[in-house]
């Protein structure tokens, strides 16, 4: 081996060592800042961070838009601030056939519909489907007004209301048929609130070495941290209840696939946290950062923002502040991140 080749080898080894050292140093500093908790003042200087980190000021008062409900049966989650609920009480208990004209059209409205009935024999509320064998003393048909695609259109809501009103009149049933205009006004207010907190945080990990990074290496590294490859082509970190906390994907959207992990090369990875859909988002962000700092040395990747600027401790703290601000704003609006109602609104 020539002196020149030896020099190149030494330089390469020094670069690898520096990457490992920097990753471990970042991880140590971040863990130390977490241990200090609130004793360390928060960073006030604006850093270059992903656009998703820009949050509404937490101090801004928010109306109490929706009372959160614990995860339960779908019928227990109905809420007139989120759903347009038509109640129908027939003269005598009826079967699901009473909605014969509605069933073929229940997918026409572009939003989730829940049909619930009070079982005439047991008195319990339960979901109703066309094949339900029970008879019901009362029915509630609820059309969700708001989701991530926005508010339902005036035309579709009017069509839904008219169809069920016609069914109720034919059955001579007592009806509670809300006004469409009032429902839409509430829905638009709720949608505006949801838009102010509907944010995702993406952290990029770019390959900083000359050697290709194979997907199989990524899989081994993240599986040690409990992540698993799912059908959507990304690795998921799950909570104890099975809810997704955050995901790891190839930055360009190429899906990971079990049968191609050994051949697939990646240049950039993205860890993604969907703030409204996880419980305790700030804590989830901490866990996601620790994962990034843990796998970075092994994979020879560097944690950067959307402009590929290395994320400093201050930048990470700034992003965390924005996550915390979104969490507090949701709570101020009466909506718990990661709750059953939040999952409905941010679907």
Image (cartoon, rainbow, N blue to C red):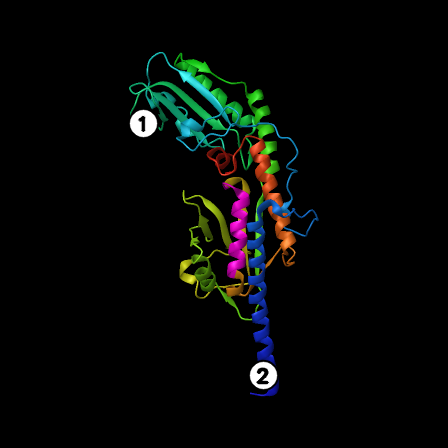
Instruction: Tell me if residue 289 comes above or below residue 266 in the rendering.
Output: above
Residue 45 spot, x, y in % from top left:
70, 49
* Residue 264 position within the rendered picture, expressed as x and y whole percent measured from the top left: 47, 64
How far apart marks 1 and 2 lie (CA) works out to 77 Å
How many neighbours does mark 1 have within 10 angstroms: few (below 14), some (14-19), or many (20 or more)? few
In this view, the mark in front (1 or 2): 2
Q: Is residue 79 magenta?
A: no
Residue 7 in view (yes/no): yes
> Which residue is at a point 59% across and 52% down the rendered structure image?
33
77 and 21: which is toward the camera: 21
Q: In this view, does 47 lie above or below 74?
A: below
Residue at the farthest right position:
45
Residue 17: % across, % down:
56, 70
**Is 137 on the left-hand or right-hand side of 200?**
left
The one nearer the camera, 40 or 12, is 40
Image label count: 2
Q: Name the residue under label 1.
A: 132
Task: Please tell me which of labels 1 and 2 falls first in the chain.
Answer: 2
Write the start and end of the magenta stretch as one range: 278-295
Q: Name the residue under label 2.
A: 6
Q: Are marks 1 and 2 in contact (CB under 8 Å)?
A: no
Quadrant where the image shows the N terminus: bottom right
Task: Report the residue at 36% width, 26% height from top.
Answer: 126
Residue 287 is one of the magenta-drawn residues: yes
What secondary structure is marked by label 2? helix
> Crowdedness of circle 2 by 10 Å Cα count: few (<14), some, many (20+)?
few
Quadrant hosting residue 11: bottom right
């Amino acid at each position: 081996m020539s002196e020149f080749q030896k020099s190149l080898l030494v330089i390469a080894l020094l670069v690898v060592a520096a990457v490992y050292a920097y990753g471990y140093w970042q991880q140590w500093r971040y863990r130390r800042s977490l241990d200090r908790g609130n004793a360390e003042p928060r960073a006030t200087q604006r850093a270059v961070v992903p656009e998703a980190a820009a949050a509404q000021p937490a101090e801004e008062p928010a109306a109490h838009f929706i009372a959160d409900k614990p995860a339960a049966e779908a019928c227990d989650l109905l809420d007139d601030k989120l759903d347009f609920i038509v109640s129908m009480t027939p003269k005598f208990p009826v079967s699901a056939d009473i909605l014969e004209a509605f069933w073929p059209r229940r997918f026409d409205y572009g939003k989730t519909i829940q049909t619930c009935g009070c079982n005439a024999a047991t008195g319990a509320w339960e979901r109703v489907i066309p094949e339900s064998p029970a008879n019901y003393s009362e029915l509630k048909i609820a059309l969700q007004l708001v989701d991530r695609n926005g508010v339902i259109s005036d035309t579709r809501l009017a069509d839904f209301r008219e169809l069920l009103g016609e069914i109720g009149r034919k059955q001579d049933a007592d009806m509670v048929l809300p006004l469409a205009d009032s429902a839409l006004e509430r829905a638009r207010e709720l949608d505006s609130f949801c838009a102010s907190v509907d944010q995702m945080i993406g952290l990029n990990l770019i390959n900083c070495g000359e050697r290709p990074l194979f997907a199989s290496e990524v899989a081994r590294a993240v599986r040690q941290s409990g992540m698993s490859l799912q059908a959507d082509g990304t690795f998921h970190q799950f909570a104890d209840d099975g809810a997704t906390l955050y995901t790891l994907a190839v930055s360009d959207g190429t899906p990971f696939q079990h049968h191609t992990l050994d051949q697939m090369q990646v240049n950039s990875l993205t860890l993604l946290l969907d703030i409204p859909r996880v419980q305790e988002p700030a804590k989830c962000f901490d866990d996601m950062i620790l994962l990034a700092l843990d796998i970075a040395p092994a994979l020879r990747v560097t944690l950067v923002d959307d402009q590929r600027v290395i994320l400093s401790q201050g930048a990470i703290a700034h992003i965390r502040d924005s996550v915390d601000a979104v969490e507090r704003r949701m709570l101020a609006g009466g909506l718990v991140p990661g709750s059953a109602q939040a999952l409905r609104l941010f679907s």
